[in-house]
Image (cartoon, helix red, strand yellow):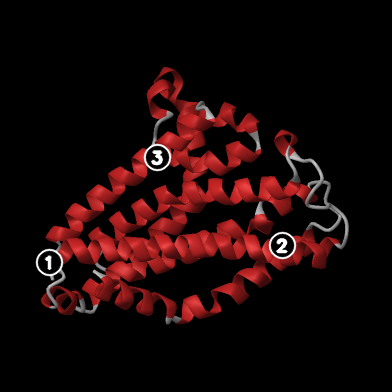
Amino acid sequence: MADILRQEFYKVWHKRSTVYTPLVIFVLMGIVGAMTIHSSDARFYISAGFAGFQWAMIMLIVIAANTISSEFEYGTIKHLIVQGNGRTLVFLAKFLVIGAYDIYLHGLVFGLTLILKPLIYGRRFAFNQNYLYGQSLMTNLVTETLVDLLGSLIIIGMIVMLACVSKTSAVAIATGIVVCFVGQGVSELLLKAAGSLSVILKWNPFNMLFLSNEWSNPSYDHNTLLSLPSLIWGNVIYALVFLVLGYEMFKHKPI
């Protein structure tokens, strides 16, 4: 297990996309920060990591899809299996590496926020001043980081499943990005048109993508029709379901 983990970590950390990710995210976060210098919601953008978590999610989708799909696309999965690892160990190793990369991305956004805040806003909006829920701005940033990390589990599960069923990583990447940017809107439209069926349809997987939004803005429960704890459990359960389905597809995918 240790050998295959080393191999998988090596593959991910030596990709060009991984190498340039910190610079790309830093620039994008800086642009968002510069656009909000005079915004009345400046503290919101700080606690939300200058939208860095959204950009990090795109990077995660790309890496997760490539980590699995590329092995089948280029036939290298045969080499991994011939080494005696077995599909179960290969799948577990890839999931652990994707999870570690997810943690890295969230830590990166958190760290870059600490750097960008004084560069953009100077001494305004001190991290120890109160913000949401009677907590400091720093506590809000830490909590937002953890909540978004939890919310990313459903994305990981979905991308792993898509990558296992798709013939190419491009399909999984495109589908994942579309879901991230359009899924919430689809869920809103679905619930508005559902009528009495909203009691059931509020549990649709797209609705779970509102977790971070509802934490930072409790009024979102009017959109989701679910409480924050319900969204948390929904994210975890759907993530597990997607991972189990992905694993079954991974086991039986032709090589």
- Residue 114, numbered circle: 2
- Answer whether labels 3 and 1 touch (C-beta < 8 Å): no
Viewer-nearest residue: 204 or 178: 204
Image quadrant assignment for residue 234: top left
Q: Position of residue 121 (x, y in %)?
A: 84, 60
**Residue 166: percent from the left, percent from the top?**
26, 62
Q: Is residue 207 above or below residue 107?
A: above
Say which label, 3 or 1, has the lower sequence index: 3
**What residue is drawn where x is 79% and y is 64%?**
34
**Residue 113 in which image quadrant:** bottom right
Label 1 amino acid?
A: Pro
Q: Amino acid at mark 2?
A: Leu
In the displayed structure, does residue 184 sit left or right of residue 124? left
Asked if the residue at tag 2 contacts the one at tag 3, i.e. Cβ–Cβ closer than 8 Å, the answer is no
**Label 3: element kind:** helix
- Residue where numbered disc 1 is placed: 254
The quadrant the N terminus occupies is bottom left
Mark 2 Cα-neighbour bin, 10 Å: few <14, some 14–19, many ≥20 = some
What residue is disc 3 on?
205
| Residue lying furthest top | 196
